[in-house]
Structure formats: C-alpha cells, structure tokens
Amino acid sequence: MKPLLLAASLSFAVTAAAGSAPPIDAGYQTDLPEGVLLPSAAPEALSAAEPPPYRPIRAANATTTRFCSNDALQFATNGPASVYPSGITVAGLSGVVTDVQVWMRNVTHADTSTLWLQLESPDGQVVGLNGSAYSVSGSPFPTASHADWSFTDQASSYAIFYGAAENHYLIFTAPIASSAYLPRNFTPLQQPAPAPTSLPRQLLSSLEGGNPNGSWRLWASQIATDAPQPSGEIGDGWCVDITTAPTSDDCYFSATRSGTIDASDAQQIGRIWRDGRAAVCTQTPYGLLQNTVPVRYDRQDFAPISDQPVCLTVTADFSQCGGGQFQIALYDSYDPATPNTGVRGHAGISNNKRISFSTRLPGNQGFTAVVNELTPGSGCPNYDLHVEANTCLPPPGDRIFGDGLEEALPPP
C-alpha cells in the first residue's frame, strides 16, 4: 500500500516589501522603481465543498516503475553539472506514458535559485523542472541541506523563494526543504550546449502518451546572475517514476500559436505595469496601467478547454523579435482601449527572450492571449506562444479541499 501524505494549508498571498529591484539578467525588465511598496495579491476564493468530478489521474491497468541514476552531480561554477547530461536507460515497459514524477536525491547547495533542471524524454520532449532567469541577489539565500525533492504535476505548490526584502519576485524557483513541487522554468533560459534548444514544456503531463523506453536525460546546470558564486551537489543522483498503461489518460491539453506584430496591426492604449511577479495559478493578478502610449498588439483567442477549473500555463518565445521588449497577458475579456481590465494573469516582466507564467482558468471559459510591444513601432517578425494544462487535475489550491489526503510514492 502506498503511504498517504497529508496535504497542508496552502497560500499564495504575496508579502511585498519596499526596496530596490535586484539585478536582472540582461533583457528582462520591470517597472519597479526604488521605494515602491507592492500591494499583496489575494488568492481567489476557493470552495471547501465536495471536490469537483475531475477524471481519474491514473488510467486503468496502470503500473508505476522507478528507475534511478547514481550520478553525483557537482556544481562548482557556472555552467553544466559535472555529469551533463545524466542519463537513465529504460527498457521493458509496455504501453504508453501516463504519468511521470522526478526525484532529486540528497541535494545540498548554497543558493538553489541558480539551479536549472530540465528533463528530456526518449521522444525528445523537454520539460522544465526548476530554474529562472533571476538568482537571489542578497542574504538570506535559499539553501538546501541533504534535501530530497520531487517534481510532479500533482504537487500543491511551486518551489517559490521570496528572499531578502528587495527580492519579492515570485520568479525565484528555489526548492529548499524535502518536498514535492510543481515543475516550472520561469522565464526559461537556454541551457549550455549540447542541451536541446526547443521551448520547454512546463508540465510533466506533456509526456503523456509517449514511449517510456529509451534514454531519459537530466540536463542540470548552474546559472548565477549575482555574486557570490554558489556551489553544491545533487549527491545521490536522481530517479524517475514512470507510470504506463495500455492507453493514455487524455488529460494533457496543448496548443501552439505563432504571430507577428507590424504596421498592419491595431494599437492598444497603453500597457500593463510590470510588477515583477508572475501569476501562479491561484493568484489574482495585480494590474495597473503603466502609461497611455499607443502600442501595437497581436491577440490569440482560445475556446474553452475544460468544463472544470484548471491551472493554465503560458510560455512565450520572443527570441525572434529582435532587440525590442514584449509583454504577454491572458484576458477573460480584452478591450484595447483599457488593456489593464479583464486581466486573468500576466508574467510581471517583459523581455526579448522567453517568458512563462500560469493562471487559474474557470471551467467553460475561453480566453485571449495578447502580445504587445513596449516601444511603439518596434514590431516583431515572429513570436511563438504555447499554452498547456492538465484537465484531469484541479488547480493546486483546490487540492487541499478534497479529502485532505494525497498519494505519494515512498522516497527513493
């Protein structure tokens, strides 16, 4: 019998303190001046009533098998881990992948905000487990001591670290204690070669329906944007729990769109204030209008994807846009005359690279993704946009209001 893990109370309320913004990797911008006191963003109200009738997350006749690598991964300087990539060969499994959970064993590190972890499946799909384009700039640093981490879409929270007073950004993905975390690469950077260059998915559910047999690879590196230079290790390697069944659960929703912004596009009046905080499923976004300067925009409209609430993840790639900065926001309803109204979630920053955030989407509701330039007339010859969700799982905040218990495999 599998042990049961009691789900604890969850809160995504933000406590923001005054202070100057920390150094940011080149290309990422916010609108935070010194001395700004950010208001807290309250979570949406969650019902403690009977849990909604989501579909089972385990397919019939499903089997879970654990595979491990004993590679000790050392991080002595910026760049790849001492074993890069670390591989696990899987053979003998039948059926297709229906669920994946990844474990990091015996992690000790002086600043986990610098760690980048990405999983590559035998089919070549890359999933971001941990990491962001920011690292914590001042004490206290997020440290881990002999911690065991797991990454699973069934966890109840991201590995978010708030840091020192000036480091109030939610985009520090920095696990500390032994726990289960939702996977996420906020503002995903390109890992050092020869890592895959494809846009990473942010859900392990994206591996659903794939071939379980072959080489599973962990791309682990350290990218520090601030001093001091951290060090550490994943001392006992890593494991992957692969659940297979004759057929997939059909839980994973995915859609990719591409677009351009040029002189033929309409203009919106102003843009959203970049508050430095990426939306994270249960957080109601805080939005102000930064200015009323007309800028070009492009919109992508989506029909409802589920009759139940879901956590919707958005990843945008602006690396083909050139030197200009671009924003992306998700709307319940979009009015270019008032682009700060009807907002469901946004990334909190702008860039000319990659951005990722997630937001709670009600059942039976369509949504609109809007990309806008920051400098009038800068334009973008091509951007890519990916949205994804596990429609069999309620948003993380809802999971603590079911029967109060969640299944978990024993530690590796």
Image (spheres, rainbow, N blue to C red):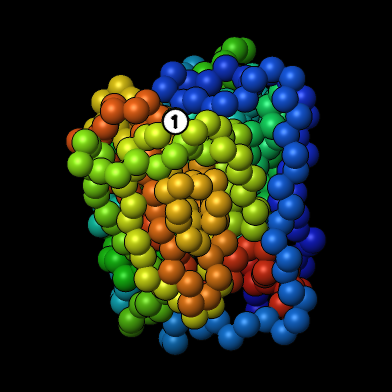
Residue 272 visible somewhere in the drawing = yes
* Left or right: 181, with 199 as reference point: right
* Residue labelled with disc 1: 293
Q: Which residue lies at the image location 64% right of the left edge and 45% below the top edge?
A: 286
Q: Which of the pair 278/140 is nearer the observer?
A: 278
Q: Which residue lies at the image location 40% right of the left edge and 78% below the top edge?
A: 249
* Residue 144, placed above or below residue 314: above
Question: Which quadrant holds residue 166?
Answer: top right
Q: Which of the pair 257/220 is nearer the observer?
A: 257
Residue 146 visible somewhere in the drawing = no
Q: Secondary structure at mark 1?
A: strand
Quadrant holding the N terminus:
bottom right
Label 1 neighbourhood size at 10 Å, few (<14), some (14-19), many (20+)? few
Q: Which residue lies at the image location 42% right of the left edge and 73% below the top edge?
A: 304
Q: Disc 1 marks which amino acid?
A: Val
Quadrant holding the C terminus:
bottom right
Total number of numbered labels? 1
* Residue 411, placed above or below residue 31: below
Residue 384 spot, x, y in % from top left: 28, 46
Q: Which of the pair 238/362 is nearer the observer?
A: 362
Residue 334 spot, x, y in % from top left: 45, 56
* Left or right: 99, with 24 as reference point: left
